[in-house]
Image (tube, helix red, strand yellow):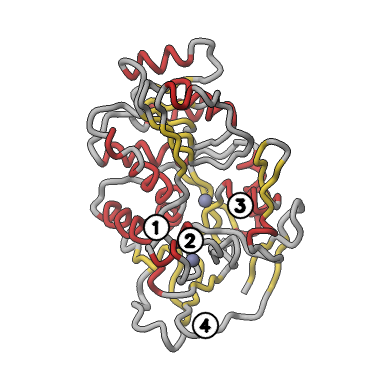
């Protein structure tokens, strides 16, 4: 097999040839057909992210040992299965749920493996999809993509699932209120579609990049606002018909979190999703004074993913813009993503 690995944090990816993998127990080996490139991969290559107040999250303290193959948005076809894997359709193409937990901690027992204390996430603690082949611990993590394009299906495992689960945190608002989505990249565009599929009001999208604002308008946003405008909050209030009750921050920088907080009406909810980095910018007394709920959402559970895939197969979603590069260009594609030059989702194809 061939893969692109992080060998040293803060250094470019390295191409590597390895011996073919043999599945043990319930493991399944897939031949990769598409691998999405996500911002989390940039953090992994970097070795961590900024927690603000001079602190840093380090992947080496979160069970990541090098070398590791990034990539948690993967589709593939069956190559081999271990003796305990059971029957697996050999002709199907699968998208992989990558947020695999230990299986025994309280989070895993509740079915929330994405919150596992000692996770084995594919593409983070375990090798992921920037490769010709990937090892998946159990076939229950595989979902048949049927007639979907792999370039559409692969990002569902992260951007799709993350937005699907984040919307659950503001479920109570969807019938009546217009949401504010901060960040018009892959997650923002996916969220626009999920809201449309649920018959919710078109949201207001906020992004500093004019091309992302244009893409959001194209995808049905009620308005797309530049947060650098002096009257950005007034523009959002106008588009929402008053102060909004829900905002989702897909960026997670101090500036975006501040905007998400400041724009909300009393009793509103801010969902933090993005992992850009930094410290919370809110004045503590305003959290009780405005009775604001700030909550986090990290990817989603295996059952969330099953629900999302059902929704996708019902035809409720269409593909967001994406572009595919050869696996050999993984490093360049990551750099483009880092520089904000990717519209929608970027994918790698090991066959090209
Ligand atoms: Zn991701
Ligand atoms: Zn666990």
The alpha-carbon separation of the residues under discs 1 and 3 comes to 20 Å
Is residue 321 positioned above or below 22 on the image?
above
Kindly identify which numbered label has been placed on residue 61: none
Q: Nearer the viewer, mark 2 or mark 3?
A: 2
Judging by the rendered image, the residue that carries numbered circle 4 is 23
Is residue 245 positioned above or below 54 on the image?
above
Which of the two labelled residues, at mark 1 and mark 3, occupies the earlier sequence position? Answer: 3
Kindly identify which numbered label has been placed on residue 301: 1
Looking at the rendered structure, the secondary structure element under dot 1 is: loop
* Image quarter of residue 295: top left
Q: Nearer the viewer, mark 1 or mark 3?
A: 1
* Mark 3 residue crowding within 10 angstroms, few (<14) / some (14–19) / many (20+): many
- Does label 3 point to a residue whose CB lies under 8 Å from ligand 1? yes
Judging by the rendered image, the residue that carries numbered circle 3 is 41
The alpha-carbon separation of the residues under discs 2 and 3 comes to 14 Å
* Mark 4 touches mark 3? (CB < 8 Å): no
Judging by the rendered image, the residue that carries numbered circle 2 is 99
Place of residue 168 in the rendered image (x, y in percent of width and height, measured from the top left): 33, 44
Which of the two labelled residues, at mark 4 and mark 1, occupies the earlier sequence position? Answer: 4
């Amino acid at each position: 097999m061939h893969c692109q690995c992080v060998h040293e944090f803060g250094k470019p990816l390295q191409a590597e040839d390895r011996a073919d993998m043999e599945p043990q127990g319930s493991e399944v080996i897939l031949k990769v057909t598409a691998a999405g490139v996500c911002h989390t991969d940039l953090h992994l290559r970097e070795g961590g992210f900024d927690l603000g107040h001079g602190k840093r999250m380090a992947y080496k303290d979160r069970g990541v040992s090098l070398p590791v193959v990034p990539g948690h948005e993967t589709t593939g076809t069956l190559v081999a299965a271990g003796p305990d894997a059971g029957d697996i359709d050999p002709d199907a193409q699968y998208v992989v749920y990558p947020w695999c937990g230990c299986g025994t901690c309280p989070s895993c027992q509740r079915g929330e493996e994405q919150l596992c204390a000692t996770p084995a996430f594919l593409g983070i603690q375990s090798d992921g999809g920037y490769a010709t082949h990937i090892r998946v611990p159990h076939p229950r993590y595989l979902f048949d993509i049927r007639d979907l394009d792999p370039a559409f299906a692969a990002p569902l495992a992260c951007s799709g699932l993350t937005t699907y689960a984040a919307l659950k945190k503001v479920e109570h608002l969807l019938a009546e209120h217009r949401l504010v989505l901060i960040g018009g990249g892959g997650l923002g565009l996916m969220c626009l579609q999920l809201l449309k599929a649920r018959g919710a009001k078109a949201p207001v999208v906020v992004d500093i990049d004019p091309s992302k604002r244009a893409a959001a308008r194209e995808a049905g946003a009620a308005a797309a606002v530049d947060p650098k405008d002096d009257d950005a909050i007034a523009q959002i209030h106008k588009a929402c018909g008053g102060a909004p009750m829900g905002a989702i921050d897909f960026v997670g920088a101090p500036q975006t979190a501040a905007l998400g907080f400041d724009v909300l009406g009393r009793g509103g909810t801010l969902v933090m999703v993005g992992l850009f980095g930094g410290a919370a910018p809110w004045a503590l007394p305003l959290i009780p004074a405005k009775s604001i709920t700030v909550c986090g959402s990290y990817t989603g559970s295996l059952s969330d993913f099953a629900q999302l895939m059902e929704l996708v197969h019902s035809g409720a979603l269409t593909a967001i813009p994406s572009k595919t590069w050869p696996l050999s260009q993984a490093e360049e594609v990551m750099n483009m993503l880092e520089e904000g030059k990717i519209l929608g989702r970027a994918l790698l194809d090991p066959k090209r």
